[in-house]
Every structure is written in C-alpha cells, then in structure tokens.
Image (cartoon, helix red, strand yellow):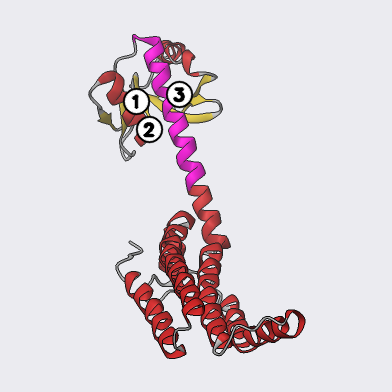
C-alpha cells in the first residue's frame, strides 16, 4: 500500500535527536538517512532499522525485545521498530546503530588494507642466516682479540666458545624480534601457513609471535646467568655447550603448546 508522507515525516521527527536526519522518497517508500548514511527504511508505514550488532544491543537495552521483519519481498531482515513514541529513545537507537556501522566498516577497511599490504617473503630470513653464520664465526674472535690487544683483558681458555654460544642465543632472539616486527609467523615451525596468517589479521599475528619471543627472552636470561657463573668458576667448555644447547631445546619445546588459533 506504500508509505504516507505524514508517517514518513513523523518518523523523521521522532529521530531528530539522532542528528542530521532526512527521509528520501524512493519507489513509493522512504529511505532514512543519518548524516548522509542510510540507517533504515520506511515501508508500508513501518520503520525498519538496518540490522547491525550495535543496533541489536541498543534495542535490547531500551525495548527489551528485538523484532525483525522484511521491508519488502526479497529484502534482508531488518529490525522492525514499532515503538516510536519516545523521541529521545528512538533517536539514541538510530545514533548507536550508525556508530556500530561506522566501526564495522572501519574495521573491515583496516582488515582489507592489512591483507593487501601483508606480503609473503623470506628475504629477511635469508639475510638473518647469512649474518648468523658470519657473526658466530667472526664477532666472538674479533671481540676477544680486541680486548686482549687493547686492554690486556684475557677471558681465559674457552672464552671465544662462550661468546659464540651467547651470540647464538642472542641471534635467535633477534630472529624472533624480526618475526614479531614483520609478522612473519609463517616462518615458525608448526605455525600457520601464509594464507592463514594473512586472513587472521595483524593483532593475532603479533600476539602469536610475541608469545614465542617471550619464551626465548626468558631462556636468554637463564643462559646469561649461567655463563656468568661459568666464567667465574671456570666450568668446562663441554658443560657450557651442553647447558646452552639444552636451554635452546627446552625453550623450543615450551613453544609447542602455543597455538595460532
């Protein structure tokens, strides 16, 4: 039967508390716009509010029951607002619905941008491997010899081996920091594939990487304390290698229960 202009004007008047409300006629019915964004329809002298979770919460808080209906045949279900007498309440419901729609659109846009920018790459990992091999071979030797030649500081037998062990531990932390910063969680053994990581979003990827990093940082602290005691009490190099290697293995095992989903 269509909507009368009087009823459309009445709905717009009741929604005035929401903000800049306008009702635009289309195909014998009316679209309800708030701040130039459609929030509902008026069809057959009934007001339908666009269906969102934010709108549902607002309606449940103020009307206790949520009714749904079809504005026209073939349409998606929308909230049917049949209690329009309280102007302030109806306005707040419409305003809350718009806020929820805007937040949902912003989150969806952010997720789409995140997925577009998230690229699969192993170049940083290859660079880390090159630096790891070069660093574990050259840096400890360079530091030990520099201290000996310039400052006459000698750390004793096995100092270079201990430096290599410490460098390897710190390098693993560096790798995990890289994974966290770049969100390369698909590098992690037993972790998600690239497509799964991409679909999950930045927040989830960072949380997964941070959980692994936390475990290995604690392992690094334990190794530092142990190596300090080893230097002070001159533990055999074989024991140092066994302890540090075991610490890395234990840390790796401790990350197994960490799940991406």
Give the magenta-colored segment's residue range: 85-107
Q: Position of residue 169 (x, y in %)?
A: 50, 76
Work out whether residue 91 or residue 129 is closer to the camera in this orientation and state it.
Answer: 129
Which residue is disc 2 drawn over? Answer: 54
Quadrant in the rendering for residue 96: top left
Q: Tell me the tag on residue 95.
A: 3
Residue 100 counted in the magenta span: yes
- Left or right, 176 with respect to 138, comes to left
Which residue is disc 1 drawn over? Answer: 58
Rendered residue at 34%/75% (across/down)? 250
Judge the density around disc 3: few (<14), some (14-19), many (≥20) Cα neighbours within 10 Å. Answer: many
Q: Are marks 1 and 2 in contact (CB under 8 Å)?
A: yes
| Above/below status of 217 relative to 65 | below
| Above/below status of 242 relative to 194 | below
Work out whether residue 125 or residue 29 is closer to the camera in this orientation and state it.
Answer: 125
Regarding residue 13, the answer to whether it shows in the image is yes
Rendered residue at 38%/71% (across/down)? 191
Q: Position of residue 35 (x, y in %)?
A: 55, 25
């Amino acid at each position: 039967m269509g909507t009368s202009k009087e009823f459309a004007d009445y709905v717009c008047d009741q929604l005035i508390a929401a903000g800049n409300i306008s009702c635009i006629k289309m195909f014998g019915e009316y679209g309800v716009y708030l701040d130039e964004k459609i929030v509902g329809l008026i069809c057959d002298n009934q007001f339908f509010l666009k269906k969102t979770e934010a709108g549902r919460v607002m309606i449940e808080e103020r009307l206790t029951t949520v009714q749904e209906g079809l504005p026209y045949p073939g349409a998606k279900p929308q909230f049917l607002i049949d209690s329009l007498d309280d102007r302030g309440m109806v306005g707040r419901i419409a305003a809350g619905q718009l806020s929820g729609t805007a937040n949902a659109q912003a989150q969806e846009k952010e997720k789409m941008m995140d997925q577009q920018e998230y690229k699969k790459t192993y170049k940083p990992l290859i660079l880390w491997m090159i630096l790891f091999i070069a660093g574990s071979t050259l840096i400890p030797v360079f530091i030990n010899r520099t201290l000996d030649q310039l400052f006459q500081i000698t750390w004793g037998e096995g100092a270079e081996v201990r430096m290599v062990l410490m460098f390897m531990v710190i390098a693993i932390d560096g790798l995990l920091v890289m994974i966290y910063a770049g969100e390369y969680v698909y590098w992690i053994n037993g972790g998600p594939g690239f497509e799964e990581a991409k679909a999950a979003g930045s927040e989830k990827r960072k949380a997964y990487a941070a959980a692994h990093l936390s475990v290995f940082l604690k392992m690094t602290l334990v190794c530092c304390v142990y190596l300090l005691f080893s230097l002070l009490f001159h533990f055999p190099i074989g024991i140092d290698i066994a302890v540090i290697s075991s610490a890395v293995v234990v840390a790796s095992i401790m990350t197994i229960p960490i799940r991406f989903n």
